[in-house]
Amino acid sequence: MSDMNAPSKKALSEAERADSVESRDLAAGRRVLQLEARALSRLAHELNENFTTAVDVLARTKGRIVVSGMGKSGHVGSKIAATLASTGAPAIFVHPAEASHGDLGMITRDDALLVLSNSGETTELSDMVQFSKRYEIPMIAIVGRAGSTLAESADVALIMADEPEAGTLGLAPTTSTTMTLALGDALAVALFERKQFSESDFHVFHPGGKLGQSLVRVRDIMHGAADLPLVGPETVMSKALIVMTAKRFGCVGVIDADGMLLGIVTDGDLRRNLTDDLLDRTASQLMTAEPQTIRVDALAAEAVRVMNERKITGLFVTDGAVPVGILHIHDCLKAGIS
Protein backbone atom coordinates (compact mmCIF):
# COMPACT_ATOMS: atom_id res chain seq x y z
CA MET A 1 0.00 0.00 0.00
CA SER A 2 1.48 3.39 -1.01
CA ASP A 3 2.16 6.16 1.51
CA MET A 4 -0.38 8.94 0.82
CA ASN A 5 1.95 11.55 2.39
CA ALA A 6 4.96 10.67 0.22
CA PRO A 7 5.83 13.34 -2.41
CA SER A 8 4.93 12.42 -5.97
CA LYS A 9 7.55 11.85 -8.64
CA LYS A 10 6.27 14.96 -10.42
CA ALA A 11 6.72 17.11 -7.28
CA LEU A 12 10.23 15.75 -6.76
CA SER A 13 11.10 16.44 -10.38
CA GLU A 14 9.92 20.06 -10.14
CA ALA A 15 11.85 20.60 -6.90
CA GLU A 16 14.98 19.12 -8.46
CA ARG A 17 14.62 21.38 -11.50
CA ALA A 18 14.19 24.43 -9.24
CA ASP A 19 17.31 23.48 -7.28
CA SER A 20 19.18 22.99 -10.54
CA VAL A 21 18.14 26.40 -11.89
CA GLU A 22 19.11 28.08 -8.63
CA SER A 23 22.49 26.35 -8.65
CA ARG A 24 23.16 27.42 -12.24
CA ASP A 25 22.12 31.01 -11.49
CA LEU A 26 24.38 31.21 -8.46
CA ALA A 27 27.26 29.68 -10.36
CA ALA A 28 26.84 32.19 -13.19
CA GLY A 29 26.62 35.12 -10.79
CA ARG A 30 29.70 34.09 -8.88
CA ARG A 31 31.63 33.43 -12.09
CA VAL A 32 30.88 36.92 -13.41
CA LEU A 33 31.78 38.64 -10.14
CA GLN A 34 35.01 36.66 -9.79
CA LEU A 35 35.99 37.35 -13.40
CA GLU A 36 35.36 41.09 -13.06
CA ALA A 37 37.10 41.22 -9.68
CA ARG A 38 40.14 39.54 -11.25
CA ALA A 39 40.10 42.08 -14.07
CA LEU A 40 40.00 45.00 -11.63
CA SER A 41 42.83 43.51 -9.59
CA ARG A 42 44.96 43.15 -12.71
CA LEU A 43 44.03 46.67 -13.83
CA ALA A 44 45.23 48.07 -10.50
CA HIS A 45 48.47 46.11 -10.75
CA GLU A 46 49.16 47.33 -14.30
CA LEU A 47 48.41 51.00 -13.61
CA ASN A 48 51.47 53.04 -14.60
CA GLU A 49 52.80 56.57 -14.96
CA ASN A 50 50.25 57.31 -17.70
CA PHE A 51 47.64 57.53 -14.96
CA THR A 52 49.59 60.28 -13.19
CA THR A 53 50.00 62.08 -16.51
CA ALA A 54 46.25 61.88 -17.08
CA VAL A 55 45.59 63.39 -13.65
CA ASP A 56 48.13 66.14 -14.50
CA VAL A 57 46.18 66.97 -17.65
CA LEU A 58 42.85 67.09 -15.83
CA ALA A 59 44.26 69.15 -12.95
CA ARG A 60 45.59 71.76 -15.41
CA THR A 61 42.29 72.02 -17.28
CA LYS A 62 40.86 75.53 -17.02
CA GLY A 63 37.58 74.65 -18.70
CA ARG A 64 35.55 71.47 -18.44
CA ILE A 65 36.33 67.81 -18.78
CA VAL A 66 34.33 66.59 -21.77
CA VAL A 67 33.58 62.86 -21.57
CA SER A 68 32.45 60.91 -24.62
CA GLY A 69 31.80 57.34 -25.67
CA MET A 70 29.44 55.31 -27.83
CA GLY A 71 26.99 52.62 -26.75
CA LYS A 72 27.70 51.09 -23.35
CA SER A 73 30.86 53.20 -23.08
CA GLY A 74 28.63 56.24 -23.46
CA HIS A 75 26.41 55.16 -20.58
CA VAL A 76 29.51 54.67 -18.43
CA GLY A 77 30.83 58.03 -19.62
CA SER A 78 27.70 59.81 -18.40
CA LYS A 79 28.29 58.42 -14.93
CA ILE A 80 31.99 59.38 -14.98
CA ALA A 81 31.09 62.94 -16.00
CA ALA A 82 28.58 63.12 -13.16
CA THR A 83 31.15 61.86 -10.65
CA LEU A 84 33.74 64.39 -11.81
CA ALA A 85 31.25 67.25 -11.67
CA SER A 86 30.06 66.34 -8.18
CA THR A 87 33.61 66.22 -6.84
CA GLY A 88 34.73 69.65 -7.95
CA ALA A 89 35.84 69.06 -11.56
CA PRO A 90 33.39 70.69 -14.01
CA ALA A 91 32.48 68.00 -16.53
CA ILE A 92 29.88 67.24 -19.18
CA PHE A 93 29.06 64.27 -21.39
CA VAL A 94 28.88 64.87 -25.14
CA HIS A 95 27.46 62.10 -27.33
CA PRO A 96 29.87 61.45 -30.22
CA ALA A 97 27.11 61.22 -32.84
CA GLU A 98 25.61 64.53 -31.68
CA ALA A 99 29.10 66.02 -31.64
CA SER A 100 29.36 65.35 -35.38
CA HIS A 101 26.12 67.28 -35.90
CA GLY A 102 26.93 70.50 -34.10
CA ASP A 103 27.75 69.64 -30.50
CA LEU A 104 31.48 69.96 -31.18
CA GLY A 105 30.70 73.64 -30.61
CA MET A 106 30.29 72.80 -26.91
CA ILE A 107 34.01 72.02 -26.66
CA THR A 108 36.51 74.85 -26.17
CA ARG A 109 40.28 75.16 -26.22
CA ASP A 110 40.27 75.33 -22.41
CA ASP A 111 38.64 71.90 -22.11
CA ALA A 112 40.10 68.41 -21.97
CA LEU A 113 38.62 65.30 -23.58
CA LEU A 114 38.16 61.96 -21.84
CA VAL A 115 37.19 59.48 -24.54
CA LEU A 116 36.08 55.89 -23.90
CA SER A 117 36.21 52.93 -26.26
CA ASN A 118 37.01 49.31 -25.57
CA SER A 119 37.98 48.51 -29.16
CA GLY A 120 39.65 51.84 -29.81
CA GLU A 121 38.15 51.80 -33.29
CA THR A 122 34.75 53.42 -32.66
CA THR A 123 33.95 55.21 -35.92
CA GLU A 124 31.62 57.74 -34.29
CA LEU A 125 34.53 59.15 -32.27
CA SER A 126 36.65 60.06 -35.31
CA ASP A 127 35.27 63.62 -35.71
CA MET A 128 35.90 64.35 -32.05
CA VAL A 129 39.46 63.01 -32.30
CA GLN A 130 40.16 65.18 -35.36
CA PHE A 131 38.62 68.20 -33.62
CA SER A 132 40.91 67.74 -30.62
CA LYS A 133 43.96 67.59 -32.89
CA ARG A 134 42.91 70.62 -34.91
CA TYR A 135 42.40 72.84 -31.87
CA GLU A 136 45.10 71.26 -29.67
CA ILE A 137 42.63 70.10 -27.04
CA PRO A 138 44.30 67.50 -24.78
CA MET A 139 42.72 64.06 -25.07
CA ILE A 140 42.84 61.17 -22.63
CA ALA A 141 41.61 57.78 -23.81
CA ILE A 142 40.42 54.84 -21.74
CA VAL A 143 40.78 52.04 -24.21
CA GLY A 144 41.08 48.27 -24.36
CA ARG A 145 43.75 47.91 -27.10
CA ALA A 146 47.18 49.51 -26.95
CA GLY A 147 47.71 49.59 -30.72
CA SER A 148 44.28 50.89 -31.62
CA THR A 149 43.60 54.10 -33.54
CA LEU A 150 42.25 55.84 -30.45
CA ALA A 151 45.16 54.79 -28.23
CA GLU A 152 47.64 56.07 -30.83
CA SER A 153 45.75 59.36 -31.31
CA ALA A 154 45.36 60.21 -27.62
CA ASP A 155 47.78 62.41 -25.71
CA VAL A 156 47.47 59.95 -22.83
CA ALA A 157 46.17 56.41 -23.20
CA LEU A 158 45.01 54.36 -20.22
CA ILE A 159 45.01 50.78 -21.43
CA MET A 160 42.67 48.37 -19.72
CA ALA A 161 43.71 44.86 -18.76
CA ASP A 162 43.19 42.25 -21.47
CA GLU A 163 40.44 40.23 -19.82
CA PRO A 164 37.46 38.46 -21.43
CA GLU A 165 33.93 39.75 -21.18
CA ALA A 166 31.77 37.89 -18.69
CA GLY A 167 29.22 35.36 -19.91
CA THR A 168 29.52 32.24 -22.02
CA LEU A 169 29.20 34.21 -25.27
CA GLY A 170 31.87 36.71 -24.29
CA LEU A 171 30.19 39.41 -26.38
CA ALA A 172 28.16 41.73 -24.16
CA PRO A 173 30.21 44.60 -22.67
CA THR A 174 30.58 43.57 -19.04
CA THR A 175 34.14 43.23 -17.83
CA SER A 176 35.28 46.07 -20.10
CA THR A 177 32.61 48.49 -18.89
CA THR A 178 33.37 47.62 -15.27
CA MET A 179 37.05 48.44 -15.82
CA THR A 180 36.15 51.67 -17.67
CA LEU A 181 33.90 52.80 -14.83
CA ALA A 182 36.53 51.91 -12.22
CA LEU A 183 39.22 53.87 -14.08
CA GLY A 184 36.88 56.85 -14.28
CA ASP A 185 36.31 56.65 -10.52
CA ALA A 186 40.05 56.34 -9.96
CA LEU A 187 40.71 59.49 -12.01
CA ALA A 188 37.98 61.42 -10.17
CA VAL A 189 39.24 60.43 -6.73
CA ALA A 190 42.91 61.07 -7.55
CA LEU A 191 41.95 64.46 -8.98
CA PHE A 192 39.90 65.63 -6.00
CA GLU A 193 42.51 64.36 -3.55
CA ARG A 194 45.18 66.32 -5.41
CA LYS A 195 42.97 69.42 -5.29
CA GLN A 196 42.29 68.77 -1.59
CA PHE A 197 38.56 68.76 -2.21
CA SER A 198 37.04 68.96 1.28
CA GLU A 199 33.89 67.72 2.96
CA SER A 200 32.47 71.25 2.93
CA ASP A 201 33.25 71.53 -0.80
CA PHE A 202 31.39 68.26 -1.31
CA HIS A 203 28.35 69.69 0.49
CA VAL A 204 28.25 72.63 -1.93
CA PHE A 205 27.52 70.18 -4.76
CA HIS A 206 25.26 67.89 -2.70
CA PRO A 207 22.84 70.17 -0.81
CA GLY A 208 19.90 67.78 -1.24
CA GLY A 209 19.02 64.24 -0.26
CA LYS A 210 20.65 62.11 2.41
CA LEU A 211 24.14 63.15 1.32
CA GLY A 212 23.27 66.80 1.75
CA GLN A 213 21.63 66.20 5.10
CA SER A 214 24.60 64.25 6.40
CA LEU A 215 26.92 67.17 5.58
CA VAL A 216 24.88 70.02 7.11
CA ARG A 217 26.87 71.90 9.75
CA VAL A 218 25.56 73.17 13.06
CA ARG A 219 26.23 76.76 11.97
CA ASP A 220 23.88 76.25 8.99
CA ILE A 221 20.77 75.63 11.12
CA MET A 222 21.49 77.05 14.58
CA HIS A 223 19.84 80.13 16.10
CA GLY A 224 22.34 83.00 16.28
CA ALA A 225 23.54 85.31 19.03
CA ALA A 226 20.40 87.47 19.00
CA ASP A 227 18.30 84.46 20.05
CA LEU A 228 20.54 83.30 22.88
CA PRO A 229 18.91 83.00 26.35
CA LEU A 230 21.74 84.19 28.60
CA VAL A 231 22.01 85.56 32.13
CA GLY A 232 24.75 86.27 34.63
CA PRO A 233 25.51 83.95 37.56
CA GLU A 234 24.00 86.34 40.12
CA THR A 235 20.76 86.86 38.20
CA VAL A 236 17.82 85.86 40.39
CA MET A 237 15.58 83.18 38.99
CA SER A 238 12.55 85.50 38.80
CA LYS A 239 14.44 87.43 36.08
CA ALA A 240 16.07 84.34 34.58
CA LEU A 241 12.61 82.83 34.08
CA ILE A 242 11.56 85.87 32.07
CA VAL A 243 14.53 85.37 29.72
CA MET A 244 13.87 81.63 29.49
CA THR A 245 10.21 82.21 28.64
CA ALA A 246 10.93 84.95 26.09
CA LYS A 247 13.49 82.91 24.16
CA ARG A 248 11.37 79.72 24.24
CA PHE A 249 14.16 77.14 24.26
CA GLY A 250 13.33 75.69 27.66
CA CYS A 251 16.67 76.71 29.11
CA VAL A 252 18.90 79.65 29.95
CA GLY A 253 22.67 79.79 29.76
CA VAL A 254 24.76 81.26 32.56
CA ILE A 255 27.81 83.26 31.47
CA ASP A 256 30.61 85.06 33.31
CA ALA A 257 31.82 88.62 32.75
CA ASP A 258 33.97 87.47 29.81
CA GLY A 259 31.04 85.81 28.08
CA MET A 260 32.22 82.28 28.87
CA LEU A 261 29.53 79.65 29.40
CA LEU A 262 29.53 78.51 33.03
CA GLY A 263 26.39 76.44 33.13
CA ILE A 264 22.79 75.95 32.08
CA VAL A 265 19.42 76.05 33.84
CA THR A 266 16.73 73.92 32.21
CA ASP A 267 13.05 73.24 32.77
CA GLY A 268 14.13 70.07 34.50
CA ASP A 269 16.31 71.99 36.94
CA LEU A 270 13.31 74.14 37.85
CA ARG A 271 11.13 71.12 38.57
CA ARG A 272 13.84 69.53 40.68
CA ASN A 273 14.21 72.71 42.75
CA LEU A 274 10.59 73.66 43.35
CA THR A 275 10.81 75.39 46.74
CA ASP A 276 9.26 78.48 48.24
CA ASP A 277 12.42 80.49 47.64
CA LEU A 278 12.99 79.32 44.04
CA LEU A 279 12.44 82.75 42.49
CA ASP A 280 14.86 84.38 44.94
CA ARG A 281 17.72 82.00 44.27
CA THR A 282 20.43 82.84 41.72
CA ALA A 283 21.07 81.18 38.42
CA SER A 284 24.45 79.91 39.64
CA GLN A 285 22.73 78.07 42.50
CA LEU A 286 20.46 76.11 40.18
CA MET A 287 22.62 75.68 37.10
CA THR A 288 24.27 72.52 35.88
CA ALA A 289 27.96 73.44 35.55
CA GLU A 290 30.00 72.64 32.44
CA PRO A 291 27.00 71.68 30.29
CA GLN A 292 27.23 69.65 27.11
CA THR A 293 27.88 71.91 24.11
CA ILE A 294 28.57 71.49 20.42
CA ARG A 295 31.17 73.17 18.19
CA VAL A 296 29.91 75.66 15.65
CA ASP A 297 31.63 73.72 12.83
CA ALA A 298 30.41 70.29 13.93
CA LEU A 299 28.10 68.25 11.72
CA ALA A 300 24.45 68.61 12.65
CA ALA A 301 24.22 64.81 12.66
CA GLU A 302 26.77 64.80 15.50
CA ALA A 303 24.57 67.22 17.45
CA VAL A 304 21.58 64.91 17.02
CA ARG A 305 23.64 61.96 18.25
CA VAL A 306 24.74 63.91 21.35
CA MET A 307 21.19 65.02 22.14
CA ASN A 308 19.86 61.49 21.74
CA GLU A 309 22.59 60.00 23.91
CA ARG A 310 22.20 62.64 26.65
CA LYS A 311 18.39 62.63 26.35
CA ILE A 312 18.31 66.42 25.97
CA THR A 313 16.53 68.63 23.45
CA GLY A 314 18.97 71.50 22.99
CA LEU A 315 22.63 72.41 22.89
CA PHE A 316 24.50 75.66 23.22
CA VAL A 317 26.80 76.15 20.24
CA THR A 318 30.21 77.42 21.24
CA ASP A 319 33.31 78.88 19.70
CA GLY A 320 35.85 77.91 22.30
CA ALA A 321 33.90 78.45 25.54
CA VAL A 322 31.86 81.38 24.25
CA PRO A 323 28.24 80.64 23.25
CA VAL A 324 27.55 81.85 19.70
CA GLY A 325 24.29 80.05 19.04
CA ILE A 326 21.79 77.49 20.25
CA LEU A 327 20.46 74.39 18.49
CA HIS A 328 17.19 72.64 19.29
CA ILE A 329 16.35 69.09 18.23
CA HIS A 330 13.41 70.50 16.26
CA ASP A 331 15.84 72.53 14.12
CA CYS A 332 17.56 69.31 13.12
CA LEU A 333 14.30 67.50 12.38
CA LYS A 334 13.11 70.39 10.20
CA ALA A 335 16.35 70.10 8.22
CA GLY A 336 15.71 66.39 7.71
CA ILE A 337 18.47 65.28 10.07
CA SER A 338 17.49 62.54 12.48
Image: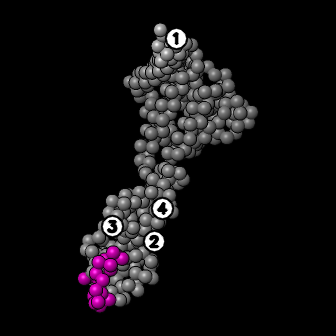
Residue 323 counted in the magenta span: no
The amino acid sitting under disc 3 is Thr
Secondary-structure class at tag 2:
loop
Pointer 1: residues within 10 angstroms few (<14), some, or many (20+)? Answer: few
Magenta-colored span: 266-285
In the picture of the structure, the residue carrying the numbered disc 3 is 293
The amino acid sitting under disc 2 is His
Q: Nearer the viewer, mark 2 or mark 4?
A: 4
Q: Earlier in the sequence, mark 1 or mark 3?
A: 1
Q: Is residue 41 above or below residue 185?
A: above
Q: Is the stretch drawn in magenta largely helix, strand or loop?
A: helix
Q: CA distance from mark 1 to mark 2?
A: 74 Å
Q: CA distance from mark 2 to mark 4?
A: 14 Å
In the picture of the structure, the residue carrying the numbered disc 1 is 9
In the picture of the structure, the residue carrying the numbered disc 2 is 223
Secondary-structure class at tag 1:
helix
Q: CA distance from mark 3 to mark 2?
A: 14 Å
